[in-house]
Image (cartoon, grey):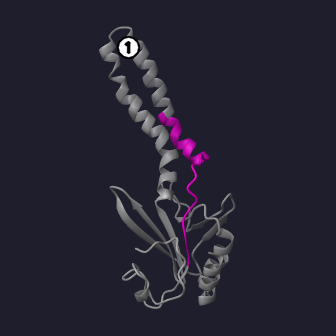
Amino acid sequence: MSDPSASSAPAAASTLPGWQGILEAGETILWQGQPDRRFRVEFDSLRHSLPGLFMVAFALFWMYQAARGSGIFALFGLIFVGVGLRQFLEPMIWPAYLRSRSWYTLTDRRAIVATDVPFRGRRLTSYPLGSDTLVEFVDGDPASILFGPEGGAKQARPGFYYIDDAREVMPMIRRVQQGRATAADSAANEAMA
């Protein structure tokens, strides 16, 4: 896969290195970017972290009480401290790490999210952008663009999270949905880079 952070002029899929077999014939890349990598603590991550914090607190209390009887017996509590710490920290750290290993591409037909995570490998997920596709602009610093309906509590909603040029990308997505995306969109993106 080519470096998604580099802008590409409109070209046939076969002429873009690394995109062979991924882009359809005649599909044009309009925009490419990467999410903001800063660490963020959000309400959802805190909500998922609270059970881990409870587990750590209970395990430490149990270890303290068990140490009165036997120091060796108290050490078994370290297993629960470790599990609780993982459950507490993972919802806050994992999304930031995943964003640092993600790349976004918008074509004249779909949105593509690529990730490259050790032990999971490279993944490429595409989301067709039809006229009936729900697309939501979430204002922020920087803003996000989300696709489709909200998933379950454990499932993150697909989208372009925390992108600096979201205000320029959103109109491009609307033109794709209306079937009016053009090579001018790609040229405008190249001029911004």
Look at 46% across and 19% down and name the residue there: 61
Give the camera-side residue of 33 and 91: 33
Q: Position of residue 92 (x, y in %)?
A: 52, 45
Q: Position of residue 141 (x, y in %)?
A: 68, 57
Q: Is residue 47 magenta?
A: yes
| Above or below: residue 45 compared with residue 179 | above
Look at 57% across and 75% down and name the residue there: 133
Look at 59% across and 72% down and name the residue there: 134
The quadrant where residue 80 appears: top left
Q: Is residue 50 magenta?
A: yes
Q: Residues within 10 Å of mark 1 (few under 14, many from 20)?
A: some
| Magenta range | 31-52
Q: Which element is circle 1 on?
A: helix
The quadrant where residue 138 appears: bottom right
| Above or below: residue 186 compared with residue 118 | below
**Residue 112 shows up from this direction:** yes
Q: Position of residue 47 (x, y in %)?
A: 56, 42
Q: Quadrant of the C terminus?
A: bottom right
**Residue 153 shows up from this direction:** no
Relative side of 133 to 20, left or right? right
Residue at the left extreme of this rendering: 72
| Above or below: residue 112 compared with residue 29 | above
Amino acid identity at mark 1: Ala
Give the camera-side residue of 90 and 183: 183
Relative side of 34 to 78, left or right? right
